[in-house]
Amino acid sequence: MAGRRPLIRTSPLCLALEETPTPLDPSVLFGFPGPVALEIGCGKGDFLRDWSIRNPGRLHLGLELRMERSQRSALKCSDAAVRNARVLCGSMEDFFKRLSTAALLEAIHVNFPDPWPKKRHARRRLVSADRVALYARHLRPGGHFVFVTDSPDLAAWGREVLLGESRLTDVFGGIRHQWPCYPESIHQRKFLAMGRCMQYQKFMRNRT
């Protein structure tokens, strides 16, 4: 992007997914155990940093495709002296293939993903039926999947997909437009400043 300052620092909290051990045990990445939460597409790291600070008993993983963006996200955590966050650079598909076991994650967050508005691109959405099934498989019983967007169309489409996954149960009983305790990302602050309405959804992995 024109005008962006070059990245001159790196963070030890950022790891290339391809260089992590297989099978992937998140506690090894941190050096201590704990329940594991994942943000898919952690962007510039504001949500990951604040989420980790508010939940110090969890191990928080952020996942990003591009190394520069991964490093920027990790640097925000490093600069805030966050110990319980790591950023992995790699694809979502590779991440789930590497996990040491299914039903491992306590929470998965997808915040403001690319809406891919054209019908022919629907399978690329992070809330497609195949991907939601993957999330359900890797959530612990009682674990949560949270989906946030500013797009009413994407929220409605995603809701239909989520309701169609038998292993998930709607926690909110609909789409919420306010969630005061939810950490804000840069995207959320931008969209709120534009007057857009947030669309929050939360589903729980069934215990049986």
Image (tube, rainbow, N blue to C red):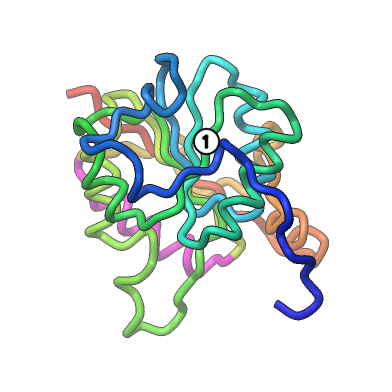
Looking at the picture, does residue 122 appear above or below residue 59? below
| Three-letter amino acid code at the position of disc 1 | Arg
Residue at 57% x, 66% y: name it: 151
Dot 1, crowdedness within 10 Å: few (<14), some or many (≥20)?
Answer: many
- 3 with respect to 118 (left or right): right
The residue depicted at 71 percent of the width and 59 percent of the height is 7
Q: Is residue 155 covered in magenta?
A: yes
Magenta stretch: helix, strand or loop mostly? helix
Q: What residue is at 27 percent from the left and 24 percent from the top?
A: 141
Q: Position of residue 12 (x, y in %)?
A: 58, 37
Camera-nearest residue between 39 and 166: 39
Please state if 84 lies on the left or on the right of 35 as rendered: right
Q: Is residue 54 magenta?
A: no
**x%, y% of residue 201?**
49, 46
Could you tell whether 97 is left or right of 113 in the image? left
- The residue at 73%/56% (across/down) is 8
Q: Nearer the viewer, residue 47 or 75?
A: 75
Image coords of residue 190 (percent x, y): 76, 61
x, y percentage for residue 170?
Answer: 38, 39
Label 1 SS: strand
In which quadrant of the rendered view does residue 36 lie? top left
User: In this picture, which residue range is highlighted in magenta?
Assistant: 151-166
Q: Which residue is mark 1?
A: 86
